């Protein structure tokens, strides 16, 4: 009996040792220093399983009477089949994956006309579709699959092999990624074909999903998060467009995104509409030629219900996902206000948040370590303390963007608004100082859209802008936050553009000069909207109006030896409608100010300007 017990114990130990060896042989994610590491067993691309499917949504936007299905592609380690391994998902969705329209002549609106003038029709273009299967895109894959994630891609509605209509910020562009996440959690149906009934399940998914992407691809993670969908644990939007009004308008002004003069929401619709050619006539008539035509309002630039429905700030109540936001302070396409407004709202909701800003232009993800820690914690559940990291990470002016400086928050908690007043002499260079001098009078500029802003800023004298400068800085001055201007003006015509640049002088004309050497921040407004961005009224020539608006948020250290310059002008050749020259704007100097968020407040300003 004793011998039998002894052999039973040996057998049990032997079986246990086999199971331990077997478990050790199975590939699993590996974490070091709070980050997912590349696992050799996941790193061979030839072993990856790649397949595609169509996920059924809850909407029909192409008018065929059937619920639209989104084309989805999956890339996962083979162990999700051979070893029953379940992993979290990194998901990117886009309207660009299947190709876009070329820059055909007439695609953009012609901006060379008087303000309020009905524009001539523009050219509509067709996208030549590039709908591939089973591979929609290769983005994210080499980064995340070797680190123990599954990567999923989908084409957004009305693009590629996804059904439906593009709406450029409409409800279906939020519900489409929600459906994919629902499918990854077993709550929605996936099919092997776009119109068949053979289903496919995401048996390899843990149900935890993180989304990321840049520009439009960074907008979609936020759109999905605003639905409150269960399973979307974390998002990393990079330079996301969070409001199509803020992208195509500015304080009542019709303003193009930088680099695309004359673009508007209907242009972007044409640019991405790569879906089924047979469905395009219905989509064009319903979305572009009806909803957009009736709502976009290029005549006044006013904010309305059409634009409110495409502003994700208005839809954030259900949002639960942890937010790591990324943006460039000198992104003049999708401007930095887009990320800041959402970051602030998410923070107020008590969501886990971090923000990463660099000093460059459009795009630019956070350092890999930041992204890795974010997804490792929220998707794999590793307690790496990321929620206790600094809230704000800012790349300083001359630093590598992979080496940001940590701050308690953005704006810098030590920043205080300091009011600066302007003094006469703006045709050459008037003063900009904290001390207010009374009876400065009025000064006039003449609009001429043919002159670029950079040339106006460098001109020693000009009738086409007014420039007010601080004393030469004797110490570095750190600006952090959103500058605000209040300008009291009169126009010689019923409508006028108003543009403001905050610049660092003298202007660096050397080859290779960084944008931070010259432009601090800028902003635009329509004086007709001085009461509200929802309503505009013609200006009475010669009558004075006060226009209050924000410039773009910034965090910049202006080096000693420079001057801060406030430049006020009318039409901006890079961004606004371009009327014929001649409109006069008269500025009341006693009633015009700028508030600068300065780290250290007025004491720091006084110290830096003696």
Image (cartoon, rainbow, N blue to C red):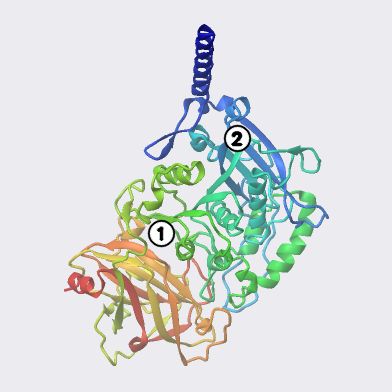
The quarter of the displayed image where residue 463 is located: bottom left
User: Residue 230: x, y in percent?
Assistant: 60, 52
Instruction: Identify the residue shown where x is 56% and y is 87%.
Output: 538
- In this picture, residue 91 sits left or right of residue 375: right
Q: Quadrant of the C terminus?
A: bottom left
Q: Which residue is mark 1?
A: 330
Mark 1: which secondary structure?
loop
Numbered circle sitting on residue 572: none
Toward which corner of the image does residue 422 lie, by quadrant?
Answer: bottom left
Picture quarter with the N terminus? top right
Residue under the point 35% across and 78% down: 594
Q: Earlier in the sequence, mark 2 or mark 1?
A: 2
Q: Would you say residue 395 is visible in this rendering?
A: yes
Residue nearer the viewer, 77 or 64: 77
Viewer-side residue, 282 vs 26: 26
Residue topped by disc 2: 75
Q: Is residue 152 above or below residue 422?
A: above
Q: Where does residue 141 sit, x and y in percent of width and height?
A: 54, 37
- The image shows residue 337, relative to residue 305, as above or below, that is above
Q: Tags 2 and 1 in contact by the CB under 8 Å rule? A: no
Give the x, y percent position of residue 494.
54, 86
* Relative to 578, residue 236 above or below: above
Q: CA distance from mark 2 to mark 1?
A: 35 Å
Instruction: Inspect this view and state whether residue 99 appears.
Output: no
Look at discs 2 and 1 and give the one toward the viewer: 2
- Observer-nearest of 264 and 450: 264
Seen at 74% across and 68% down, the residue is 290
Q: Residue at image x 63%, y 57%?
A: 174
In this rendering, the answer to whether 579 lies above or below 28 is below
**Element type where label 2 sits in the image:** strand
């Amino acid at each position: 009996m004793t011998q039998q017990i002894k052999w039973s114990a040996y057998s049990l130990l032997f079986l246990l040792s086999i199971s331990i060896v077997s478990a050790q042989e199975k590939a699993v994610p590996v974490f070091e220093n709070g980050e997912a590491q590349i696992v050799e067993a996941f790193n061979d691309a030839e072993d990856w399983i790649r397949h595609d499917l169509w996920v059924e949504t809850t909407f029909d936007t192409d008018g065929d009477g059937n619920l639209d299905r989104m084309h989805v592609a999956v890339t996962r380690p083979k162990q999700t089949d051979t070893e029953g391994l379940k992993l979290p998902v990194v998901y990117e969705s886009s309207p660009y994956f299947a190709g876009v329209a070329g820059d055909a002549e007439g695609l953009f609106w012609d901006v060379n006309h008087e303000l309020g003038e009905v524009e001539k029709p523009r050219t509509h273009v067709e996208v030549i579709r590039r709908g591939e299967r089973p591979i929609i895109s290769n983005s994210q894959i080499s980064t995340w699959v070797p680190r123990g994630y599954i990567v999923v891609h989908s084409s957004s509605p009305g693009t590629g092999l996804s059904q439906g209509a593009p709406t450029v910020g409409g409800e279906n562009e939020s519900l489409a990624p929600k459906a994919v996440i629902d499918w990854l959690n077993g709550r929605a149906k996936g099919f092997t074909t776009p119109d068949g009934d053979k289903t496919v399940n995401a048996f390899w998914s843990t149900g935890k999903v993180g989304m990321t992407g840049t520009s439009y691809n960074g907008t979609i993670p936020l759109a999905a998060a605003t639905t409150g969908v269960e399973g979307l644990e974390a998002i990393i939007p990079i330079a996301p467009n969070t409001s199509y009004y803020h992208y195509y308008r500015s304080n009542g002004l019709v303003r193009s995104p930088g680099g695309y003069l004359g673009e508007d929401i209907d242009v972007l619709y044409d640019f991405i509409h790569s879906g089924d050619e047979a469905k395009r006539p219905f989509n064009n008539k319903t979305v572009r030629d009806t909803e957009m035509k009736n709502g976009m309002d290029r005549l006044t630039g006013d904010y309305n219900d059409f634009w409110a429905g495409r502003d994700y700030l208005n839809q954030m109540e259900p949002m639960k996902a942890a937010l790591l936001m990324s943006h460039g302070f000198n992104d003049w396409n999708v401007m930095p206000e887009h990320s800041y407004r959402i970051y602030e709202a998410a923070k107020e909701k008590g969501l886990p948040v971090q923000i990463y800003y660099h000093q460059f232009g459009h795009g630019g993800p956070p350092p890999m370590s930041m992204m890795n820690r974010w997804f490792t914690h929220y998707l794999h559940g590793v307690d790496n303390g990321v929620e206790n990291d600094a809230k704000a990470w800012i790349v300083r002016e001359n630093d590598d963007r992979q080496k940001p400086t940590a701050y308690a928050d953005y704006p810098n908690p030590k920043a205080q608004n300091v009011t600066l007043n302007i003094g006469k002499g703006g045709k050459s260079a008037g003063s900009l100082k904290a001390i207010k001098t009374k009876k400065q009078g009025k000064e006039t500029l003449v609009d001429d859209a043919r002159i670029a802003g950079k040339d106006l800023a460098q001109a020693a004298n000009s009738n086409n802008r007014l420039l007010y400068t601080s004393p030469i800085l004797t110490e570095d001055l750190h600006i952090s936050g959103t500058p605000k201007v209040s300008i009291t003006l009169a126009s010689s015509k019923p409508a006028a553009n108003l543009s403001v640049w905050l610049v660092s002088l003298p202007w660096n004309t050397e080859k290779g000069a960084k944008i931070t050497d010259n432009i601090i921040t800028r902003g635009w407004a329509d004086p007709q909207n001085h009461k509200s961005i929802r309503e505009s009224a013609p200006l009475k020539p010669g009558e004075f109006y006060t226009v209050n608006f924000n410039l773009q948020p910034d965090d910049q250290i202006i080096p000693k030896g420079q001057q801060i310059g406030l430049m006020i002008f009318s039409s901006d050749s890079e961004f606004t409608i371009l009327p014929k020259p001649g409109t006069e704007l008269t500025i009341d100097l006693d009633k015009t100010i700028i508030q600068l968020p300065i780290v250290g407040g007025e004491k720091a300003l006084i110290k830096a300007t003696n």
